[in-house]
Image (tube, grey):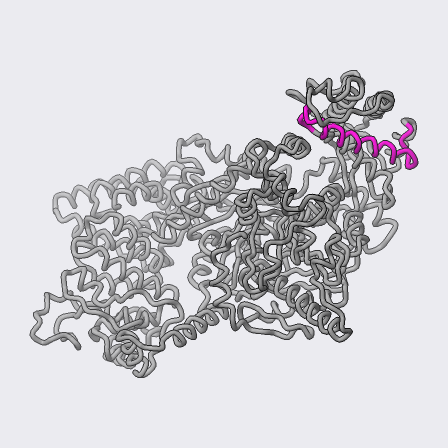
């Protein structure tokens, strides 16, 4: 049996799960359910009870997978109990459902077939199932590429792998398959029992595909064929949904869906999957491959398998069959010639020449070849027979793959459920072939190589075929199904149960902004006539640089296509004519840039590298990573970018399908025809826009992954100003959309959003977990130890409020330790306010409240300045008198604090002014100061971390009084490196990353941050910082003429003069902090140029300081 090590832990914590009665069904849910979750489960249960279909949209992060599993399995368990009671009343034995459904899952109780797009998504579903109380027997179906363990086969791919596996099985040369056959018994007809079936339900394990492969291979069983054996005995069957919607794969896996419940998770792709499964493409390689396979069969018929192979066990076709195979060969060649003779005409709206027609056009093409509805069955039988013969003759090492494709095409064209009016035929010139495919192509068409497409335009064809198999219910769910009406009409089956759920997050946890223009005012749009211009790419790059500067940790940037991503990245790697840094270099200054790879094998390492850089940023408070990805790509769905991995999603354009693609053009044409004949159908243009909006909504879904997550969504596309595109966004997003008229508004909105976005208080899941932990601890404390008795004594004390988030370690006398003073221990689990009070040293003239009197006090720092800012006096309610100290003493736990009244005044002021999240960051900054120690000036990394934390708190320059007062308690040897971070007026101006030279600066204005200094005060400060009268006179002599030159200069000509002015400040390190104040004395037209000049040196200064 497979091993899932965490099952026992799940059972222990899931003993007393909440039970909800949903539509008369008892549903056990692992957490306290939200209203939207109960509504979702009600829709699921009602659909299952009535045997109807449901279309359910619920945003990512609302727990839809867990709700679906709990509701469906709860309904199935109740149905099983009711059936058992009914059977017992009739005095008949109750047989297991697996026995009743051994013929393909058609027993009395339905099987739940749970499907998603990929196996990685199914692994997440299995993890969710392990959180519940349900332990059904499960099975996971996969391909040979994922499940084969034979050393000679697992390294191959595609047709080669299938052929090699079939040859080994036919020759009985696969030991894993032989062991599986041996366990079936001598008759080879019995089923291998499910390994979990005989276990009690509570002891069953729930393997994902990796667990299943590992356990089966350890038993020397073939996982691929073993899963096919178990699928009829399992209560829950997991598989990618293309296994079910593709008729050929459904036949190959022998899957029957009668009486079953079909669950399509991430169902926004089902529409496309159904259409593609009912469509076919045949090209030159298929015709050439079919001819080769027939030649092999003819060779067997002519010479006999024993003579050809020299081995026993291979049967040759009868001699009379050779003529039939020669006719079959000629039929394939004639079909290629007929396709080559079709006239190609220019497309009406552009694109390559092509021949198009409805499904009946293919019937007309095949009729002269004597391939009709009456004769197609004979051709299909010959193709299937060829596959069997070639597998038996293992010498060929391949199967009749191409002939089977011909057979599948004929089944679709002439099948009983065939609807030619819903198909379109398209013939185009094939791309140039290379390698073996090109050399082996058939030559009957004298060089003409064409592709035949038989494309289904109605996804309902595939879905109706599934429902016709006798399913009980079809449940489709995703976070991006809207609009549900058009989605249901496309699938062609009734959905009586529909739901569009809101989100469970608060409004402050999401910011959705439409950004129609960049920093320089250039329009941001991915229209065809605009997206390839250098101006657009430069503006987009400048906008992303500013986003990387303003957004913490991880950022996801989605492009409309891989071509758009590659083109932008290529230009951003080139230097401009001024020789300045490239856009990528400017991005790297703030975050590591990572680009989505083209190959599947490289995706996992890229994601890992991205999350590593984000984790570093989460620990240090600086840096992060930005990931460039593609809408509809591998990273736009199925990957969990929760919390710090995605604090913002940027959409750089509408991912509209390629308008000249034949499939897109024919789909639009088909919908327009249907619209003219019936009302309520989508038009071609509406479908075209919906495809883009579904891709956008899917990418946006990366930003919120759970109830406490938060992030911003920036739509860098001016077309989102139009109502029709904003209405295409998911329902839960529409109420939060705001349009930024100027890019500077983004720079103001983003910092404010991240300051206020952190959710307050524990979630229901966290409360439930805390209660479970407390209950287990109380049960296990039969004989309390000494520490336990101490905890009991503490519990007898008066209750002290504890912060909702886990409190940081004791921070008593943090700054005293940095100055070499004695520190004490703080009370157990003190709130952050109490820790901050205890973290500050004792100013002069005041005694330590709990310190022994005989202990000698070190020299205290200077006393705090009286609060003078009117805004802070109003916010804190104190004007410098004894009131703040009084308020601090009445705070819970303040009487036990080691803090002095002056320290209490500072911390009470900080608590009143800062938000909860900022106050937590304030505590973390004190912790970092403590780690520096008395000699922390030599610790460059530590200084950099404290600087980053101080910038996060005091960066907006709104808490100047708190910063100045806190800085007075910092040891003198640390004040120099930290002053610019605590008082960031100069740093704010220098860190403004202008869009481009001459572009618009989006940084914070000096005039908004602080009152401009007078000239006398500025010169006095400069003289004091320089320290030498002679050096100060030289400074005056040099800067006076430069200021005179600036008065008559244009902004373009002033760049050289501003560089000279900056060189003066740079030459005297003490003067660098006055650069921002100096901006007040410049002419207004040169303020932006001065900020750009300072910004160009900011990175150098930061490295020097570090």
Magenta region: which residues? 370-398
Q: Is residue 214 above or below residue 125?
A: above
| Among the 4 quarters of the image, the one containing residue 523 | top right
Near-viewer residue (88 or 356): 88
Most distant residue in the front direction:
186
- 134 sits left or right of 190 in the view: left
Q: Is residue 821 above or below residue 144?
A: below
User: Can residue 280 be spotted in the picture?
Assistant: yes
Magenta stretch encompasses residue 391:
yes
Near-viewer residue (982 or 904): 904
Which residue appears at 51% of the width and 53% of the height?
Answer: 3
Name the magenta segment's main secondary structure.
helix
The tally of labels here is 0
| Among the 4 quarters of the image, the one containing residue 583 | top left
Near-viewer residue (144 or 700): 144
Query: Where residue 477 sits: x, y (%)?
Result: 66, 57
Which residue appears at 44% of the width and 60% of the height?
Answer: 752
Query: Where residue 659 sits: x, y (%)?
Result: 71, 38
Query: Where residue 244 sits: x, y (%)?
Result: 71, 48
Query: Where residue 947 sits: x, y (%)?
Result: 29, 53
User: Can residue 523 be spotted in the picture?
Assistant: no
Near-viewer residue (239 or 727): 239
- 780 sits left or right of 209 in the view: left
Q: Is residue 1048 above or below residue 868?
A: above
| Among the 4 quarters of the image, the one containing residue 400 | top right
Magenta stretch encompasses residue 473:
no
- 588 sits left or right of 305 in the view: left
């Amino acid at each position: 049996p497979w091993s899932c090590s965490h099952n026992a832990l799940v059972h222990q914590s899931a003993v007393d799960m909440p039970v909800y009665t949903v539509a008369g069904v008892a549903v056990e849910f692992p957490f306290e359910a939200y209203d939207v979750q109960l509504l979702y489960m009600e829709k699921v249960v009602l659909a299952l009870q009535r045997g109807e279909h449901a279309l359910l949209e619920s945003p990512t992060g609302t727990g839809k997978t867990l709700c679906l599993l709990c509701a469906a399995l709860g309904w199935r368990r109740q149905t099983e109990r009711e059936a058992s009671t009914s059977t017992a009343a009739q005095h008949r034995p109750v047989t297991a459902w697996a026995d009743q459904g051994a013929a393909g899952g058609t027993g009395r109780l339905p099987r739940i077939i749970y499907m998603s797009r990929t196996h990685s998504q199914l692994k997440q579903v299995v993890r969710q199932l392990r959180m519940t109380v349900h332990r059904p027997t499960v099975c996971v179906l996969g391909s040979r590429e994922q499940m084969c363990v034979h050393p000679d086969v697992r390294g191959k791919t595609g047709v080669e792998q299938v052929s090699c596996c079939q040859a080994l099985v036919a020759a009985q040369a696969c030991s894993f398959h032989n062991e599986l056959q041996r366990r079936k018994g001598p008759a080879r007809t019995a089923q291998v029992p499910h390994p979990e079936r005989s276990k009690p339900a509570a002891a069953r394990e729930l393997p994902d595909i990796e667990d299943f492969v590992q356990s089966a291979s350890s038993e020397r069983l073939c996982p691929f064929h073993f899963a096919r054996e178990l699928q009829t005995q399992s209560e829950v069957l997991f598989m990618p949904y293309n296994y079910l919607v593709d008729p050929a794969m459904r036949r190959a896996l022998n899957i029957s869906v009668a009486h079953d419940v079909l669950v399509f998770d991430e169902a926004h792709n089902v529409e496309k999957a159904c259409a593609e499964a009912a469509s076919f493409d045949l090209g030159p390689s298929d015709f050439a491959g079919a001819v080769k396979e027939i030649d092999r069969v003819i060779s067997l018929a002519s010479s006999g398998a024993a003579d050809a192979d020299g081995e026993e066990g291979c049967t040759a076709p009868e001699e009379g069959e050779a003529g039939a195979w020669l006719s079959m060969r000629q039929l394939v060649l004639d079909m290629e010639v007929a396709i080559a003779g079709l006239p190609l005409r220019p497309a009406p709206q552009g694109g390559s020449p092509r021949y198009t027609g409805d499904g009946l056009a293919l019937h007309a093409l095949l009729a002269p070849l004597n391939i009709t509805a009456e004769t197609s069955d004979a051709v299909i039988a010959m193709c299937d027979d060829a596959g069997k013969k070639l597998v038996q003759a293992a010498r060929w090492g391949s199967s009749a793959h191409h002939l089977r494709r011909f057979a599948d095409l004929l089944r679709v064209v002439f099948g009983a459920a065939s609807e030619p009016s819903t198909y379109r035929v398209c013939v185009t010139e094939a791309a140039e072939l290379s390698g073996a495919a090109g050399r082996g192509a058939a030559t009957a068409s004298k060089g003409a190589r064409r592709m035949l497409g038989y494309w289904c335009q109605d996804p309902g064809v595939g879905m109706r075929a599934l429902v016709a198999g006798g399913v009980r219910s079809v449940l489709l769910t995703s976070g991006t199904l809207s609009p549900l009406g058009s989605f249901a009409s496309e699938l062609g089956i009734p959905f009586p149960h529909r739901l569009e759920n809101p989100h469970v997050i608060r409004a402050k946890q999401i910011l959705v902004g439409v950004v129609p223009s960049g920093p320089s005012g250039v329009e941001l749009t991915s229209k065809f006539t605009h997206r390839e211009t250098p101006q657009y790419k430069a503006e987009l790059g400048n906008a992303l640089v500013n986003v990387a500067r303003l957004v913490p940790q991880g950022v996801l940037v989605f492009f409309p296509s891989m071509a758009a991503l590659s083109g932008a990245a290529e230009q951003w790697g080139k230097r401009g004519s001024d020789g300045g840094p490239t856009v990528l270099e400017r991005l790297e200054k703030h975050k590591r840039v990572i680009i989505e790879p083209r190959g599947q094998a490289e995706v996992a390492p890229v994601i890992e590298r991205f999350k590593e850089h984000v984790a570093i940023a989460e620990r240090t408070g600086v840096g992060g990573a930005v990931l460039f990805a593609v809408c509809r790509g591998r990273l736009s769905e199925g990957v969990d970018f929760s919390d710090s991995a995605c604090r913002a999603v940027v959409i750089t354009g509408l991912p509209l399908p390629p308008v000249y693609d034949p499939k897109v053009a024919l789909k639009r044409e088909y919908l327009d025809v249907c619209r003219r004949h019936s009302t309520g159908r989508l038009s071609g243009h509406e479908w075209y826009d919906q495809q883009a909006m579904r891709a956008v909504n899917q990418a946006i879904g990366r930003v919120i992954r759970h109830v406490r997550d938060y992030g911003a969504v920036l739509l860098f596309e001016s077309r989102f100003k139009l109502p029709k595109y904003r209405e295409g966004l998911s329902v839960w997003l529409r109420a939060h959309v705001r349009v930024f008229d100027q890019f500077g508004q983004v720079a103001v909105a983003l910092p404010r959003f991240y300051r206020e976005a952190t959710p307050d208080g524990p979630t229901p899941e966290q409360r439930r977990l805390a209660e479970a932990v407390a209950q287990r601890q109380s049960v296990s404390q039969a004989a309390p130890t000494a520490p336990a008795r101490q905890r009991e004594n503490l519990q007898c004390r008066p209750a002290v409020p504890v912060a909702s988030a886990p409190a940081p370690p004791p921070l008593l006398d943090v700054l005293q330790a940095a100055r070499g003073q004695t520190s004490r221990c703080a009370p157990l689990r003190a709130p952050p306010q109490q820790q901050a009070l205890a973290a500050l040293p004792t100013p002069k003239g005041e005694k330590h409240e709990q310190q022994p009197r005989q202990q000698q006090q070190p020299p205290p720092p200077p006393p705090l300045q009286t609060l003078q800012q009117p805004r802070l006096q109003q916010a804190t309610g104190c004007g410098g008198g004894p009131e703040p100290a009084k308020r601090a003493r009445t705070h819970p736990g303040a009487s036990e604090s080691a803090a002095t009244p002056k320290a209490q005044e500072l911390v009470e002021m900080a608590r009143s002014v800062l938000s909860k999240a900022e106050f937590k960051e304030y505590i973390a900054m004190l912790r970092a100061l403590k780690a520096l120690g008395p000699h922390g000036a030599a610790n460059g990394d530590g200084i950099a971390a404290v600087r980053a934390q101080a910038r996060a708190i005091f960066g907006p320059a709104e808490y100047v009084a708190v910063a100045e007062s806190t800085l007075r308690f910092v040891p003198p040897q640390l004040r120099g490196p930290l002053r610019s971070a605590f008082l960031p007026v100069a740093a704010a101006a220098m860190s403004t990353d202008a869009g481009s030279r001459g572009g618009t600066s989006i940084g914070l204005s000096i005039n908004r941050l602080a009152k401009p200094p007078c000239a006398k005060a500025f010169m006095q400060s400069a003289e004091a910082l320089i320290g030498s009268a002679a050096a100060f006179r030289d400074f005056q002599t040099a800067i006076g003429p430069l200021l005179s030159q600036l008065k008559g200069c244009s902004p373009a000509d002033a760049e050289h003069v501003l560089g000279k002015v900056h060189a003066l400040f740079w030459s005297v390190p003490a003067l660098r902090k006055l650069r921002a104040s100096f901006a007040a004395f410049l002419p207004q037209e040169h303020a932006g140029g001065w900020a750009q000049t300072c910004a160009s040196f900011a990175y150098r200064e930061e490295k020097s300081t570090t």
